[in-house]
């Protein structure tokens, strides 16, 4: 039973910039650069029939290519931080792409995504990091920013059930016009 999600790949030069953020945060498990991505829609564990339907349905997405960049670091989890993330700068094209995928996945019977969409790349997962350590790390690295990169496709990823962080396999790719 595959675990699926859609996402945007991160170009090697941007991934290198993100990987330079590694270190200096006790209790962090740093994500490998080859596993960086911006999730669009988590689909979850599905049987092969649903996986084929998802892949076919995503062919209906007809959007234009666009540019993105990262603008700052943040932590998810409130008082008990769970992850350090690089935030994607506001992009209407990205929001529309994600919303279309959400509508299509609901149309084929998948449950709606329960959380508000917050585009990001997870840089580190946190186990025993204190909120003070995370705050100190963010005060040093929080102004992180990358140059823009062009997004000319999105992909359907699969992963195995694990603690997160990959490895991810591209099952299908979908060009943007």
Image (spheres, grey):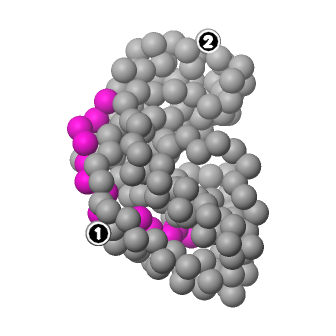
Q: Residue 140: name its quadrant.
A: top left
Residue 26 left/right relative to 10: right
Residue 137 left/right relative to 158: left
Residue found at x 30% / y 60%: 65
| Count of numbered marks | 2
Residue found at x 29% / y 69%: 177
Q: Which residue is mark 1?
A: 177
Q: Which residue is mark 2?
A: 132
Residue 123 left/right relative to 79: left
The one of 177 and 49 positioned closer to us in this rendering: 177
Residue 18 is a magenta residue: no
Point out residue 68 in the picture as x, y percentages from the top left corner.
32, 45
Residue 159 is a magenta residue: yes
Range shown magenta? 145-160
Tag 2, which secondary structure?
A: helix
Point out residue 123 in the picture as x, y percentages from the top left corner.
48, 39
| Most common SS among magenta residues | strand
- Whether residue 153 can be seen here: no
Among the two numbered marks 2 and 1 on one chain, the one whose residue lies closer to the N terminus: 2
Point out residue 21 in the picture as x, y percentages from the top left corner.
39, 31
Question: Which quarter of the image is occupied by the N terminus?
Answer: bottom right
Residue 122 left/right relative to 161: left
Q: Residues within 10 Å of mark 2 (few under 14, many from 20)?
A: few
Label 2 to label 1: alpha-carbon separation: 45 Å
């Amino acid at each position: 039973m595959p675990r699926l999600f859609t996402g945007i790949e991160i170009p090697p030069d941007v991934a290198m910039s993100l990987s330079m953020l590694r270190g200096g945060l006790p209790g962090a498990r740093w994500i490998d650069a080859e596993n960086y991505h911006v999730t669009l829609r988590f689909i979850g564990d599905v049987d092969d029939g649903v996986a084929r339907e998802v892949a076919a349905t995503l062919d209906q997405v007809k959007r234009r290519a666009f540019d993105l960049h990262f603008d700052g670091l943040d932590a998810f989890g409130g008082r008990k931080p769970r992850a350090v993330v690089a935030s994607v700068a506001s992009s209407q094209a990205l929001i529309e792409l994600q919303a279309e995928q959400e509508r299509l996945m609901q149309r084929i019977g998948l449950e709606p995504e329960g959380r508000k969409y917050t585009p990001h790349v997870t840089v580190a997962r946190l186990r025993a990091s204190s909120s003070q350590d995370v705050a100190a790390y963010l005060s040093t690295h929080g102004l992180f920013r990358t140059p823009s990169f062009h997004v000319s496709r999105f992909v359907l990823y699969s992963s195995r059930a694990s603690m997160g962080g990959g490895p991810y396999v591209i099952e299908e790719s979908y060009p943007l016009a």
